[in-house]
């Protein structure tokens, strides 16, 4: 999560909403990929931290199935990212701050643990939540 926070900070300094993500290998010891929000930087509406990290992790593994992997992200995933997490078959999603307005991993929806889907990653929330939220609060305060 520290690494994800560093990524989030990088996004914030580039003028993007500070959200960062990291994908860990199945044994949890190797960082396969990192990503931070790049919507403003790239003009791509899908350039959320999680999507970029998932794409890079799949490229690193040479395979779209990220079975056994863990995605760590500073903010609760939105519906798009929650869908991508289910599609990628990651085993675990760890997030920092809850997103009461748009979160899709427990707050507004719970897409990742929807029993109607055939893959449901484990969810761990609230890891360094205060620090994750503070980055966002500080970012929007200075806007
Ligand atoms: Zn998202």
Image (tube, grey):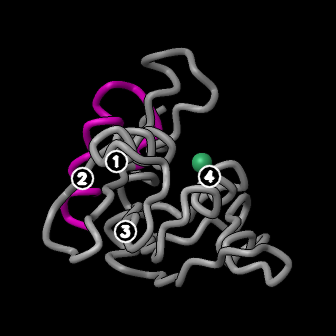
Disc number placed over residue 32 in the picture, else none: 2
Residue found 63% across the figure and 63% down from its top = 86
Q: Nearer the viewer, residue 67 or 38?
A: 67
Q: Is residue 85 left or right of residue 1?
A: right
Residue 8 is left or right of residue 94, and the answer is left
Residue at the location (31% across, 67% down)?
131
Is the residue 58 above or below the residue 1 in the image? above
* CB within 8 Å, label 4 to label 3: no
Mark 4 residue's CB less than 8 Å from ligand 1: yes
Whether residues under marks 1 and 3 lie with C-beta atoms below 8 angstroms apart, the answer is yes
Left or right of residue 8, residue 29 in this image: left
- Marker disc for residue 74: none
Mark 1 lies on a secondary structure that is: helix
- For mark 4, what is the residue? 84
The residue identified by callout 3 is 69
The answer to whether mark 2 and mark 4 are in CB contact below 8 A is no
Which residue matches tag 1?
57
Identify the mark nearer the N-term, 2 or 4: 2
Look at the image and give the residue range highlighted in magenta.
1-19
Magenta part mainly helix, strand or loop? helix
With respect to residue 65, does 45 lie above or below?
above
Find residue 81 and report its horizontal and vertical position in percent: 61, 52
For disc 1, the neighbor class at 10 Å (few under 14, some 14 to 19, many from 20) is many
Q: Earlier in the sequence, mark 3 or mark 2?
A: 2
Q: Residue at x 70, y 66 (%)?
A: 104
Judged from the image, the secondary structure of the residue bearing numbered disc 2 is strand
Q: CA distance from mark 1 to mark 4?
A: 13 Å
């Amino acid at each position: 999560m520290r690494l994800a926070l560093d990524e989030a900070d990088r996004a914030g300094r580039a003028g993007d909403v500070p959200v960062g993500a990291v994908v860990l290998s199945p044994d949890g010891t190797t960082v396969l990929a990192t990503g931070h929000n790049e919507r403003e930087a790239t003009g791509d509406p899908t350039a959320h931290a999680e999507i970029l990290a998932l794409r890079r992790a799949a490229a690193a593994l040479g395979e779209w199935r990220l079975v056994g992997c863990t995605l760590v992200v500073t903010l609760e995933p939105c519906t798009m990212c929650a869908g991508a997490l289910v599609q990628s078959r990651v085993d675990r999603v760890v997030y920092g701050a809850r997103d009461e307005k748009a979160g899709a991993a427990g707050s507004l929806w719970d897409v990742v643990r929807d029993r109607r889907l055939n893959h449901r990653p484990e969810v761990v929330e609230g890891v360094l939540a205060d620090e994750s939220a503070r980055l966002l609060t500080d970012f929007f305060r200075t806007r």
